[in-house]
Image: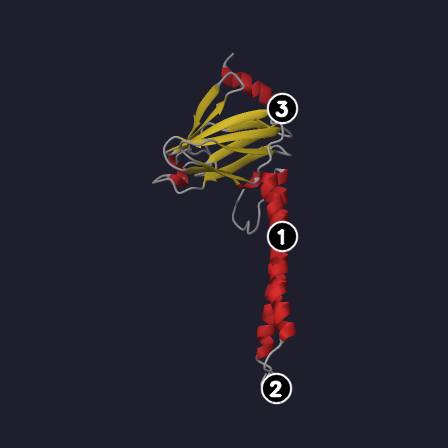
Amino acid sequence: MMTWKTLMSPDSASPLMEQLTFLHDHALMILLMITVLVGYLMASLFFNQFNYRYLLEGQTIEMIWTILPAVILIFIALPSLRLLYMLDEVNNPLVTVKTIGHQWYWSYEYTDFFNIEFDSYMIPSNEIEDYHFRLLDVDNRIAVPYNSQIRMIVTAADVLHSWTIPTIGVKIDAAPGRLNQISFLLNRTGIFFGQCSEICGANHSFMPIVMESISPSYFISWIYDMSEV
Ligand code: CUA
């Protein structure tokens, strides 16, 4: 989860988040090289006169500093495009979960398992226990099996919301009148926290998301517990 001093990406819990981290690091390295180069050039200006009477044009350097930035941009754009298409890929999901954004809570539906439906509200600050994270825990968490492809269907009932969990690299808008789809795979167990990230009204900050990544067999028992069959 995101905590204090998590200055860069959180530890990933899915291959997609891992790829996002790689792209971030790649772009940051290029940024660092540009910063060092420009910093060196600017610093060297202080130690030069640069008043050469016969220098009126420089075709070679103009060519270099026109084409080089374009090439650098391509080196960022192509991996970025590759990741963009990877994020949209839906490979044979085993579990489909539907989530609906409301003002101001999330509700979830497991339509392929006994039509389980429930709401997920934030635990108010005056009701939190020692094991809760303030403003981040909810009364009803969603559970999904790990090492299984999950499909998330996202929509909203009133205004725009955004279903976002940084650790798994998912951030998808919940729009009224529209069904959005995202697919992800959790490669480890754990509890993953997220928040709405579309400014949706007065209590926008208070509709967090908590997802439990559990083993498939525990998931089956959880489904049976929820369905009361
Ligand atoms: Cu829902 Cu912000």
Amino acid bearing label 2: Tyr
- Separation (CA) of disc 2 from disc 1: 44 Å
Horizontal side, residue 197 vs residue 224: left or right: left
Q: CA distance from mark 1 to mark 3?
A: 33 Å
Asked if ligand 1 lies within 8 A of label 2, the reply is no
> In the rendered structure, which disc, 2 or 1, sits on the residue that comes first in sequence?
1
At which x and y percent is residue 50? 59, 83
Quadrant occupied by the N terminus: top right
The amino acid beneath tag 3 is Pro
| 68 vs 180: above or below | below
- From the image, state whether disc 1 or disc 3 is nearer to you: 1
Question: Horizontal and vertical percent for residue 208?
Answer: 45, 36
> Label for residue 25?
1
Q: Callout 1, which amino acid? A: Asp
Left or right: residue 228 versus residue 30 is: left
Question: Residue at coordinates 56% horizontally, 40% vertically from top-left?
Answer: 169
- Element type at mark 3: helix
Instruction: Please state which of the two labelled residues, at mark 2 or mark 1, is closer to the viewer.
Output: 2
Q: Where residue 41 sits: x, y (%)? A: 60, 73
Point 64% across, 59% down: residue: 71
* SS type, badge 2: loop
Q: Which residue is drawn at the image coordinates 64% and 48% (left, top)? A: 22
| Of callouts 3 and 2, the N-terminal one | 2
Q: Is residue 153 left or right of residue 146?
A: left
Residue 118's spot in the image, x, y percent? 44, 23
Q: Which residue is mark 2?
A: 54
* Label 1 vs 3, first from the N-terminus: 1
